[in-house]
Image (cartoon, grey):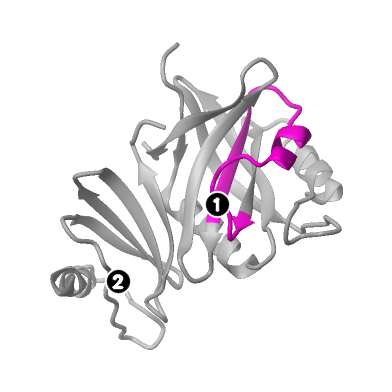
Amino acid sequence: MLGVGALVAAAFMTSGRPAAPSGSYSATLAAPSERIDSAAIDGNRILLRLSGPNGEELVVMDAGSGRVIGRIAINAKP
Amino acid sequence: MSERALHLSDELAAQLLGAAARAFPLECCGLIEGIRIKGGWRATALHEAPNLAEDPARRFLIDPQRQFDLMRALRGRETRIIGCFHSHPEGPALPSATDRAQALEDDFLWLIAGGSDESGFTLKAYVFTAESGFVPIALREES
C-alpha cells in the first residue's frame, strides 16, 4: 500500500504538470497487487489507471483530500 | 451479437463521478452527448442537469428544459443525445425498479454511479431496449 502511494507521488513529480493548487499533496491508495499504468491531474482530481489481476481500472481521487471519489472497471466484460 | 461498448474519456468519467459525489446524498443526473461508432458509442460530453424529482434522494428527473435546449443546440451537428446518467446514493450501480419503469427509448444508454461519499462510487453502463430491457455494456477508454 505504501509503495503504491509513493508511486503516485513519483508519477506527478515527473509529469511536469502542476499538481494541486497548493503545489503539493499526498495520497495513499489501497491497491494491493495492482500497478499504476498512468496518472494525470484533471482540475482538482487525480486520475489513476491501474491494472492488476482483475483487469484495468480507472480510479478518481480528490487531489485535495486524497479521498477516492470512484472506481470504474475499464475494458472489462460487462 | 458482438459486444457493444461505450467509449468514455477519463475526464468525462471523472466528471460523472465528481457529480455523484457533489450531489450526495441526493441523486445527480444529466444527459450524455455522443455519437454511434462501430461496435458501440463514443461519449463526447456530459451535461449535468438539475434533479427536479420530488424525492431527489431516491429518484431523479432531468429538467426537460435542459433536454430541449440541448436537443436544439445539437441540431445540424454530428453528435446527439445518446443516453442519460444518474447516481444511486448508498445503492448499487444497477438499474432500479424505478429506472426500469421510466426507461422508454430504445438503444438509449444509461450510466449509473452507485456508492457513497465515504466509500466512493462505482460506474456501470447499460443500454436499454424494449425487447431486452437493461443490458450491461463494457466501458472502454477513448480511442
Q: What element carries label 1?
A: strand
Residue on which the image places disc 1: B113
Q: Can you identify the residue that label 2 sits on?
A: A17
Task: Tell me the residue at 77%/34% (across/down).
Answer: B101
Residue B55 position within the rendered picture, expressed as x and y whole percent measured from the top left? 81, 59
Chain letter of the residue carrying label 2: A
Task: Residue A50 in the image: state x and y as whole percent.
Answer: 25, 53
Q: Disc 2 or disc 1, which is closer to the eye? A: 1
Residue B11 coordinates in the image, percent (x, y): 45, 55
Q: Which amino acid does label 2 sit on?
A: Arg
Q: Is residue B56 left or right of residue B29?
A: right
Count of numbered tags: 2
Q: Residues within 10 Å of mark 1 (few under 14, many from 20)?
A: many
For image coordinates 58% across by 29% down, the residue present is B127
**Residue plotted at (24% across, 71% down):** A12
Which residues lie in the magenta part? Answer: B88-114
* Amino acid marked by disc 1: Ala
C-alpha separation, residue under disc 2 versus residue under disc 1: 29 Å
Out of B57 and A15, give the one closest to the viewer. B57
Extreme residue toward the top, this view = B1
In front here: A37 or B68? A37
- Protein chain holding label 1: B
A3 sits left or right of B8 in the view: left
Q: How crowded is mark 2: few (under 14 residues within 10 Å), some or many (20 or more)?
A: few
Q: In this view, does A49 lie to the left or right of B130?
A: left
| Residue sitting nearer the eye, B64 or B69 | B64
